[in-house]
Image (cartoon, helix red, strand yellow):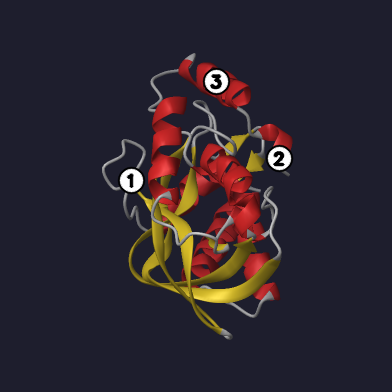
Amino acid sequence: MLKREDFSRERIDTIVAEIRKHGPFEAMTHEEREANRREFLSRLPAGEDLWVFGYGSLIWNQAFYYIESRPTRLYGYHRSFCLHLTIGRGTAEKPGLMLALDKGGSCNGIAFRIAADQIESETEILWMREMISGAYIPHYGNLKTDQGVVKGLTFVINRHHSRYLGDLGLNKTAAMICNGRGPLGTCREYLENTVTQLAEIGVKDRYLSRLQETVNQRNHRVH
């Protein structure tokens, strides 16, 4: 599990330096990351709370403070294992795939409300978590909840980034998920956690279910 203490400039420098020992790794500088965060914050209504949309590990491992959560649906983007991974749950020797939000369709998840007076500190955590490499783009859009529509932040895939792989197809995606392993665990565990946590809020993602079935079949054949 990631903790707040895991997100600092020093730790990011250490992680990036370690990855680059094994090959090129496209990463944002601290100045670029902070400028990106400031540009986003400048667009927010003054004095209002901030909703953040979680679709993967943010559902069960936020590492930021929030005061409310709601099941929600984001339109215009869908879950996709399309991000090449050599960090966290992957390494240069055991690369994997990470979920991202790609264009098209819709996606169920959870919206977390950050109090207005904590937006500064908690977005620092979020940007160090989500924007190490610049593979994501902050998106501010409508989130549909049972209590109405709210505006919220989510991070969607940057299709121009070197780590973006697009739709690899079910079998190749499953193979890379079976392969991915790093300091935070395996990509297979990440997939299983996401499916389990979504089920707890009554959501069955057909894409993830088919993928999990294919991963389990591959694992069964290996053993």
Q: Is mark 3 on a helix, strand or loop?
A: helix
Q: Look at label 2 and name its amino acid.
A: Arg
Is 74 or 90 nearer to us in this picture?
Answer: 74
Cβ atoms under marks 3 and 2 closer than 8 Å: no
Q: Which residue does the numbered mark 1 point to in the structure image? A: 165
Q: Which residue does the numbered mark 3 point to in the structure image? A: 13
Would you say residue 133 is visible in this rendering? no
Is 30 or 171 nearer to us in this picture?
Answer: 30
Would you say residue 170 is visible in this rendering? yes
Task: Judge from the rendering whether residue 55 lies leftward or rightward of residue 135; answer left or right.
Answer: right
Q: Where is residue 215 in the image (x, y as percent from the top left)?
A: 55, 56
Q: Earlier in the sequence, mark 2 or mark 1?
A: 2
Q: Which residue does the numbered mark 2 point to in the structure image? A: 4
Mark 3, Cα crowd under 10 Å, few <14 / some 14-19 / many 20+, is some
C-alpha distance separating marks 1 and 3:
25 Å
| Quadrant where the image shows the N terminus | top right
Q: Look at label 3 and name its amino acid.
A: Asp
Q: Is mark 1 on a helix, strand or loop?
A: loop
Q: Is residue 133 above or below residue 213?
A: above
Task: Judge from the rendering whether residue 187 lies leftward or rightward of residue 45; answer left or right.
Answer: right
